Image (cartoon, coloured by chain):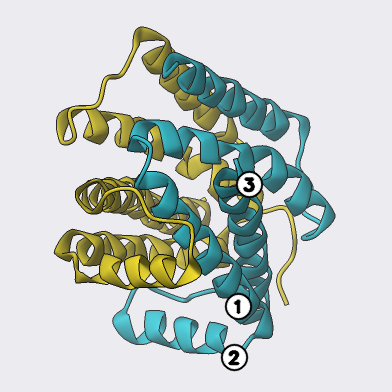
Chain colours: A cyan, B yellow
Amino acid sequence: MILFSLIVIAGTGGELCVSRAMKVVGDAKSFRPHEVGRVILSALCVPWMWLGVGMMAIAFFALLAALSVFNVSFVVPVTALSYVAGAFGSSVFLHERVNRQRWLGVLLVAVGVTLVFLGNH
Amino acid sequence: MTNQTHFHLKTFLPIAVMIVAGPLGNVLLGKGMRQIGKLPVWPPSRLIQAGLSIFDSGLIWLGIASLITFFVAYMLALSWADYSFVQPASSLAYGVVALLGYWVLGEKVSPLHWAGIAIICLGVLIVGRTTPRTTGHG
């Protein structure tokens, strides 16, 4: 339970921090290696990126520990609890407007993932 | 109109990479950790020792490489579109994880599990029909 909480909370928190960092960096102009490299280097100069990477590292080791005990098809759906945290976090923390249609999509994804979870028991 | 098409293309290409590289990474990590076995939690010295031994596995490194690919694609997608669009849109990865778990690792996937995946895809379709970006940049 602790492992799954760590995966969800640290993972979602990390993703929100990375997203905030990428909004500071701005748009990537193309897929060229030079441009991709520039975006990565710029992102590394933003403190939010390091906080995000640190939290994602914690989530990663929690994921490894969970995978040492449970099946991939069980562990990955459980991590989808992050959709609930992510939708709330992005509207509150990143001030993104999550409209009704997107909430419906996120809700359906969450219901589907819950069925996947139940289907494994 | 052309700009809109270009915007959608450059948003969906990294999402496609995420959908393949993310699950592949998870499955490789799962296979690697299955070989290593359950990690000891106590005492901490044994946990650290076991934690370091994880990185002796080639499968773990392949999984990490795949997840780094996922992460770069994720960063690119986030630079163009909202987090609340990118995260649900990448949830097709749940279907890919189940398929890979079933084919590669021989995991059991029940009918309820597949039904859940179908609902996830429906949710993704609905999210995919909304505008990828709702906030201004810079």
Residue A51 position by quadrant: bottom right
Q: Secondary structure at mark 1?
A: helix
Marks 3 and 1 sit apart, C-alpha to C-alpha, by 22 Å
The disc placed on residue A88 is none
Chain identifier of the residue bearing label 2 in the image: A
Judged by depth in the image, the label closer to the viewer, 3 or 1, is 3
- The residue beneath circle 2 is A45
- The residue beneath circle 3 is A5
Q: Amino acid at mark 1?
A: Met
CB under 8 Å between discs 1 and 2: yes
N-terminal-most mark, 3 or 2: 3
Whole-percent x and y of residue B128?
Answer: 53, 37
- The residue beneath circle 1 is A49
* Frontmost residue, A55 versus B45: B45
Q: Is residue A86 left or right of residue A92?
A: left
Figure check: A47 above or below A98:
below
